[in-house]
Amino acid sequence: MNKLSQAFDFRHACKVFDETKKIAPNDLDAILDAGRKSPSSFGMEPWHFVVISDADIKQKLSSACYNQPQIMSCSHLVIVLYRKAVQFTMQSEYLRQTVRRNLPTEGVSFELDAACQYFINYCTNGLPEGVSIDNWAEMQCYIPSANMMTAAAYYGIDSCAIGGFEHNKVMAILEAIKPQFSINNFDVALCLPFGYRKNPQSPQIRWKKEEVVTFL
């Protein structure tokens, strides 16, 4: 069995981490790089990863996450933020910088405006009915989240995807520390605690391949 297959078998939703064990900086960098290098629609990378190891900040976030034990017991907590619609307008420097990376240096001013407008038109008319830019950005964040959890498992590090939290409270805590994380600009997609399991892994239960895969 290769190491990637082993990682998929190793990964589970860890409920309690061993508080005495901390993730080495090099391993943490590898996990974050797996998120950073993830694919995204239009290459927009509409995410930001907030890495928290400070016990006081984790304590504040714990109550906003319904006091789930992973928040306090993990080595590092990664809050995966998604960029909200205000960051994808013609006036948004983030949109313009992101689009500019893929444009030629000659004639960039006209082409940049046109390329930005193309993306905005897609978000206005090309998304499925009922799906907003915020919905689109949030869904993109599940890609790096999955990649980070798989990368962690590859290095023998546990994780858990937490979707149960009070958005406004989490954002208020982050904004109080870093004003750039305003609820007007960002919101939370997932909370990802990383660390080392305290208890044995529970059996991994999955449907059989023939029950979830159809070849046509």
Image (tube, rainbow, N blue to C red):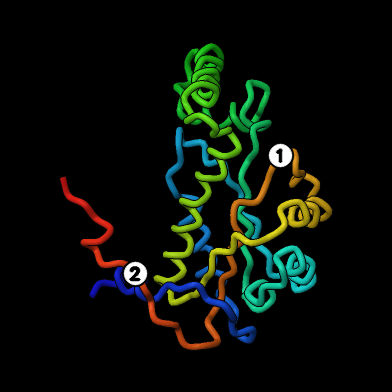
**Residue that appears at 79% across and 57% down:** 173
How many numbered discs? 2
Q: Does 165 sit left or right of 155 as displayed?
A: right
Marks 1 and 2: which is nearer the front? 2
**Three-letter amino acid code at the position of disc 1:** Asn
Q: Could you tell me residue 62's position as x and y percent?
A: 73, 69
Q: Which corner quadrant of the image does residue 84 belong to?
A: top right
* Residue at far right of view: 176
From the image, which quarter does the C terminus lie in?
top left
**Residue hosting label 1:** 185
Badge 2, how many Cα within 10 Å: few under 14, some, many 20+? few
Mark 2: which amino acid? Answer: Arg
Give whichever of 199, 111 is nearer the camera. Answer: 199
Please tell me whether residue 183 is drawn above or below residue 90 in the rendered image. Answer: below
Whole-percent x and y of residue 17?
59, 81
| Element carrying mark 1 | loop
Q: Position of residue 172 (x, y in %)?
A: 80, 52
Q: Nearer the viewer, residue 188 or 112?
A: 188
Q: Which residue is mark 2?
A: 206
Residue at position x 43%, y 65% from top?
A: 151
Q: Is residue 55 left or right of residue 93?
A: right
Element assignment for label 2: loop
Of mark 1 and mark 2, the one earlier in the sequence is 1
Residue lying at 32% horizontally and 74% vertically, measured from the top left: 6
Badge 1: residue crowd in 10 Å (few <14, some 14–19, many ≥20): some
- Figure check: 64 above or below 1: above
Q: Residue furthest left?
A: 216
Q: Which residue is located at x 59 percent, y 26 percent? A: 96
